[in-house]
Image: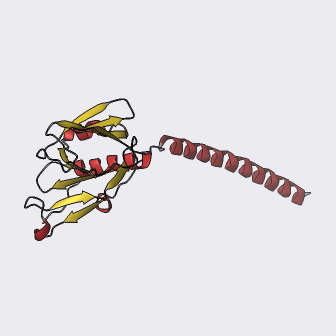
Amino acid sequence: MRHKNILFILFIFLSFSYVFGQSVSKKENESNVKKISQDTLITKVVDCNALFTLNNRKVDFLRKKPYVYTEPYYKMDYKSKKNFAVFQVGKRKGTTPFLYIKIFTFNTCIKKDEVVELIMDNGFRYRLKNDFSPNCDGFIISTLKNKIIKKLEQGNITSIKIFTFEKDYEFHMNDEDSERFRDELQCLKYNKFKFN
């Protein structure tokens, strides 16, 4: 009889412990779920040094200064299957970032004016001036000031239009290129590159 009472008390104690333990673990799981749902802000980490190549060789300086540059974007004019261009961003030591463009069409004359238009997925359009001298070799260099980079960070670039004397070109950017381009601009704006 005494053993039965002890077993009964032990059974009740174990049952109570099990129920109590279940409610505690359920509360812990609920608090963990809340914590996870509250901390779901995704932060993208970009390795700026992996996106850029640093050129510190004196024989290769750009206007007597070292510079960083990205992998180029090779694009085809969406209206024509014959016209190609290369786009590349970079920065010289102590200067503002720049966008370099070369159109590979013979005798493409570029004036020193607002000849580049960046079209965003949010509907905004930004015009960039050619800082390079007028030429018929298809060269364009546009300075990317911080206020322009700030605007370009707010969406994806869907296409780049270039206005020349003879005709206009339009080059489309896919989502992957547009995201990479935005990462590169942010790196140029915020990252401190170690120039020699």
Q: Quadrant of the C terminus?
A: bottom left
- Residue in the image at 12% along x and 64% along y: 61
Residue 8 drawn at (x, y percent)? 85, 53
- Residue in the image at 79% along x and 56% along y: 10
In this rendering, position of residue 19 left or right of residue 44: right
- Residue in the image at 15% along x and 48% along y: 96
Q: Judge by depth and name the residue closer to the eye, 81 or 10.
A: 81
Q: Judge by depth and name the residue closer to the eye, 9 or 40.
A: 40
- Residue in the image at 24% along x and 38% along y: 166
Residue 6 drawn at (x, y percent)? 83, 57
Q: Judge by depth and name the residue closer to the eye, 160 or 106.
A: 106
In this rendering, position of residue 130 left or right of residue 40: left
Colour mode of the rendering: secondary structure
Q: Is residue 194 above or below residue 127?
A: below
Q: Is residue 47 above or below residue 133?
A: below
Residue 111 drawn at (x, y percent)? 15, 40
Q: Quadrant of the N terminus?
A: bottom right
Q: In the picture, residue 14 is in which quadrant?
A: bottom right
Residue 144 drawn at (x, y percent)? 20, 43
**Residue most toward the top?**
123
